[in-house]
Image (cartoon, helix red, strand yellow):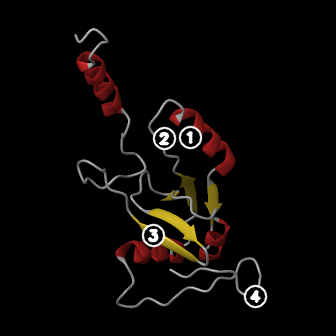
C-alpha cells in the first residue's frame, strides 16, 4: 500500500485505491482505520542465535523505541524504515497483521512459524518451546571425552 505525506504535510496521505491486487491484509487495515479504530504499532524485535543474540536484541529494542499509536492511515508514515511490527487495533486482544515501512510504501502481511508454518499472532507463544529445545540440546550434548 502506498502511504506517504502529501505535500510534506502531516495528517494527509496518498493511498492506492482498492483493486483486484489489494490483499486481504490491506483491506483489513483499511477497514480498521475507516471504522475509526485507534491502532498501536508494536515493534517486533527478533533475537538472533549466538551468545550475543539477546544483548543485540535489547540494543535493537532500545534503538527502535516504544510502540507507536496510530489514528489515521497518514500516521503510517511515522513507522521506522524496515522494522516489522504488529498492527493492533486497540479494541481487539490479538492481531495477525504485521506492518513494515519500506521507502514510500507500507507493506502489510502475516508471519508464519518457520517450522510449523502456523500463522503467528501478537499473542502467539513463540518462546515456551525454546526451553524444551535447550534441555534437549543439553541432554544430547557430547562432552570433550566423547560421552
Closer to the eye: label 1 or 4: 1
The residue where tag 4 is placed is 7
Asked which secondary structure carries label 3, the reply is strand
The span from disc 4 to disc 2 (Cα, nearest Å) is 38 Å
The residue where tag 2 is placed is 47
Q: In the picture provided, is 10 more to the left or to the right than 51?
A: right
The span from disc 1 to disc 4 (Cα, nearest Å) is 36 Å
Asked which secondary structure carries label 1, the reply is helix
Residue 112, quarter of the rendered image: bottom left
The disc placed on residue 57 is: 1
Q: From where the camera sits, is residue 77 visible?
A: yes
Please state the horizontal and vertical placement of residue 37, each as a whole percent of the image. 54, 67
Quick check: marks 3 and 1 in contact, CB under 8 Å? no
Q: Give the mark, 1 or 4, whose residue is nearer the N terminus.
A: 4
Please state the horizontal and vertical placement of residue 55, each as a whole percent of the image. 58, 33
Which of these two is toward me, 124 or 94? 124
Q: Residues within 10 Å of mark 2 (few under 14, many from 20)?
A: some
Please state the horizontal and vertical placement of residue 12, each as a whole percent of the image. 69, 82
Q: Give the mark, 3 or 1, whose residue is nearer the N terminus.
A: 1
Please state the horizontal and vertical placement of residue 140, each as a whole percent of the image. 23, 19
The span from disc 3 to disc 2 (Cα, nearest Å) is 22 Å
Which of these two is toward me, 49 or 70? 49
Quick check: marks 2 and 1 in contact, CB under 8 Å? yes
Measured along the vertical axis of the image, is residue 120 above or below residue 144? below
Q: In the picture provided, is 58 more to the left or to the right than 123?
A: right
Asked which secondary structure carries label 4, the reply is loop
The span from disc 3 to disc 1 (Cα, nearest Å) is 23 Å
The residue where tag 3 is placed is 108
Amino acid at each position: 500500500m502506498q502511504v506517504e505525506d502529501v505535500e510534506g504535510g502531516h495528517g494527509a496521505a496518498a493511498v492506492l485505491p482498492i483493486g483486484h491486487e489489494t490483499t486481504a491484509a490491506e483491506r483489513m487495515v483499511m477497514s480498521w482505520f475507516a471504522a475509526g479504530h485507534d491502532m498501536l504499532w508494536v515493534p517486533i524485535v527478533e533475537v538472533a542465535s549466538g551468545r550475543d543474540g539477546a544483548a543485540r536484541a535489547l540494543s535493537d529494542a532500545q534503538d527502535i523505541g516504544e510502540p507507536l499509536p496510530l489514528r489515521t492511515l497518514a500516521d503510517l508514515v511515522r513507522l521506522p524504515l524496515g522494522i516489522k511490527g504488529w498492527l493492533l487495533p486497540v479494541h481487539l486482544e490479538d492481531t495477525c497483521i504485521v506492518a513494515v515501512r519500506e521507502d514510500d510504501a507500507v507493506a502489510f502481511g502475516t508471519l508464519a512459524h518457520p517450522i510449523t508454518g502456523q500463522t503467528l499472532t501478537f499473542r502467539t507463544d513463540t518462546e515456551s518451546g525454546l526451553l524444551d529445545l535447550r534441555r534437549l540440546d543439553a541432554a544430547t550434548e557430547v562432552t570433550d571425552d566423547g560421552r
